[in-house]
Image (spheres, rainbow, N blue to C red):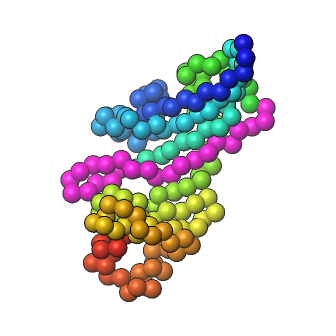
Amino acid sequence: GGAWNSTYYFHPQDIAADNRTDMEQEMVDSNFISVPVYVVSTSGSGTSAKITSSIRTDFKELALDNLKMFVKDSEKMAEIPSGLTSVTPSSDAVLTQAGSLVYRTMFMWNDYNTAGRPCHTTDMTGMPSLLIWGYGGLYPVAMLNNVAPAQMATAVHASNAHRTVLGW
């Protein structure tokens, strides 16, 4: 057969119960199963596939006004070793191999505002960013890079009331 590329999306319920994290199990128990935990790309030919990239998203629970939400905590990218063995192109084999890889944090969602929107993030270099939400908290209106929440609070003398208005 010819060469091909394929992308697999694995949701919390796709992971064997004994391999799930506590948060993944909580997501399954709460029927929050539509978002992928792993996105794995493969390439191959015939009946042999190699993982070319794998991204893992970890989630955390956020409680807002008696509403339980699952929000992104971090996004991690797998370090693909050069001698990674080929697997059969089946979702079970790909998920097993993806789960055994070493992942490096690329992006973190550190804090969310009272509407459940991200307001403080950190990238893989450790650079913090603040998102400011406007139009009633519906749309991001500014992203301030290399600014930590304490620096912003000092710069605008923000009280908790100001933080709510600014959306962070």
Describe residue 94's horizontal placement relative to residue 152 as left or right: right
Question: Residue 17 appears at what percent x and percent y?
Answer: 43, 28
Question: Residue 95 appears at what percent x and percent y?
Answer: 56, 28
Report the span colored magenta: 61-83
Asked if residue 81 is among those painted magenta in the image, a careful observer would answer yes
Residue located farthest toward the right when viewing the structure as drawn: 83
Q: Is residue 114 above or below residue 161?
A: above
- Magenta highlight: main SS: strand
Residue located farthest toward the left when viewing the structure as drawn: 66
Quadrant in which residue 134 is drawn = bottom left
Q: Nearer the viewer, residue 140 or 88?
A: 140
Judge whether residue 13 can be spotted in this image. Answer: yes
- Report the quarter where the N terminus lies: top right
Judge whether residue 25 can be spotted in this image. Answer: no
Quadrant in which residue 77 is drawn = top right
Q: Residue at image x 37%, y 67%?
A: 133
Q: Nearer the viewer, residue 152 or 13?
A: 152
Question: Residue 120 appears at what percent x and percent y?
Answer: 45, 65
Q: Is residue 30 above or below residue 118?
A: above
Q: Tell me how many marks there are.
A: 0
Q: Is residue 92 above or below residue 62?
A: above
Q: Residue at image x 38%, y 86%?
A: 157
Asked if residue 114 is among those painted magenta in the image, a careful observer would answer no
Q: Residue at image x 73%, y 17%?
A: 2
- Report the quarter where the C terminus lies: bottom left
Describe residue 46's horizontal placement relative to residue 29 as left or right: right
Question: Residue 72 appears at what percent x and percent y?
Answer: 44, 50
Q: Residue at image x 69%, y 14%?
A: 47
